[in-house]
Amino acid sequence: MFPQKVWLSSPTMHGDELRYMTEAYETNWMSTVGANINETERLACELTGSGYAVALSCGTAALHLAMKILGERLYGQPRPGHGTLEGRKVFCTDTTFDATVNPVAYEGGEAVFIDTEPDTWNMDPVALEKAFELYPEVRLVIVAHLYGTPGKIAELREVCSRHGALILEDAAESLGAAYEGVQTGRFGDVAALSFNGNKIITGSAGGMFLTDSREEADKVRKWSTQSREDAPWYQHEEIGYNYRMSNVIAGVVRGQFPHLQEHIAQKKAIYERYREGFAGLPVSMNPYDSAKSEPNFWLSCILIDEAAMCRTVRSDKEALYIPEPGKSCPTEILEAIQGLNAEGRPVWKPMHMQPIYANNAFITAQGTGRARTNAYIDEGSCLDVGADLFRRGLCLPSDNKMTPQQQDIIIETVRACFE
């Protein structure tokens, strides 16, 4: 057992973070304005190539205001007390964290979940095309890049362009990743970043809204500070939010930015060490298109071959399995990793399998349907890719402070599960 826990992905500090936080303290810029915020926004634009960036309290806030701004662009200002998407459908990445899709509900819309493709574990362009055939009125699509791996961006953009739809790009997990030499965060009409404590660089919290429109950046900045009008008193003419990033948090993010490429290199080395260490096992690593994309390798994951899966069943909150020689399952491997005092995690449970979204539409490359526990949809026998990834996949300890010796022990522990 490791004397100190090996985390899935924890913050890695370097020193300048404390210097910038101390600067905020000593100059008394402890609120939601200051040099750290200004510089963090500049660095985000410099990295991604975006025209404007607005520093916000978290990635979810960035996603919410991105959703709101695109809703207004498409449908105009809503009636008082109503969201910008009231009653309208939005196509959403299915295999993701719920922060990606919850802003649809915040703005009164209805998420329609698009199945995953197996080549990058992201939104399937074929399923997206099928969704437009079923719901031709939809004009907004949320695309996420799972675990720092860019999806099939060219194909997804082509489908959206043909159907006149805007893209909200959730780049929360993919900061620093590139597709055909272009940074993620540049492929949507607007985009959102996250600096949560487990991300590739962090502020302990924080997020960023990206756009090429100065008008939209100014509007989001206004919304994020309770929509205060330019008046000598507190004047409010539309609903606002307390979403602005703190200058203290921005100091941490500012100190992290110079170390992004270093973190990516460390994460990639972890991924490659796992890939080599699992040679000969009936597993595969989370995939990417090496000809087109360079992930940031935020999390390293494995997918167990179907023939090597032991018998297992999951309820909403528990999992049971029967050990079998030469076979394993995510639950058995995660229990073994936990026994080392290390942290792993199942891959994201798809949104269409979440109880809160049980009645929302779900579209596969073959059509529409709902998930069953055996990972096949009810209508026909076409494979539900996201549910299958959830059934057979897991995230391995990917902390960039993990030593090669610690990782070797984790590799041997995983190998032992298949003996």
Image (cartoon, grey):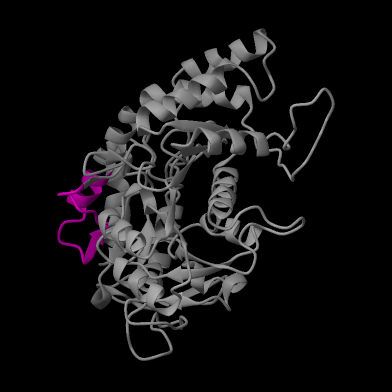
In the image, is residue 402 above or below residue 315? above
Tell me, yes or no, whether the highlighted magenta stretch contains residue 80.
Answer: no
What residue is shown at x 28% (from left), y 73% (from top)? Answer: 327
Q: Report the quarter where the C terminus lies.
A: bottom left
Q: Is residue 276 magenta?
A: yes
Residue that sits furthest to the bottom in the current view: 380
Of residue 293 and residue 371, the one placed in the foreground of this image is 293
Closer to the camera in the image, 162 or 39: 162
In the image, residue 254 lies at what x, y percent?
A: 48, 22
Locate residue 364 relative to residue 248 in the image: left or right. left
Residue found at x 37% / y 25%: 259
| Residue sitting at x 53%, y 12% | 19
Residue 280 in the figure: left or right of residue 261: left
Q: Position of residue 164 (x, y in %)?
A: 40, 61
Position of residue 359 measured from the top left corner of the image (x, y, whole percent): 58, 79
Residue range (magenta): 271-292
Q: Is residue 54 visible?
A: yes
- Do we see residue 396 in this rendering? no
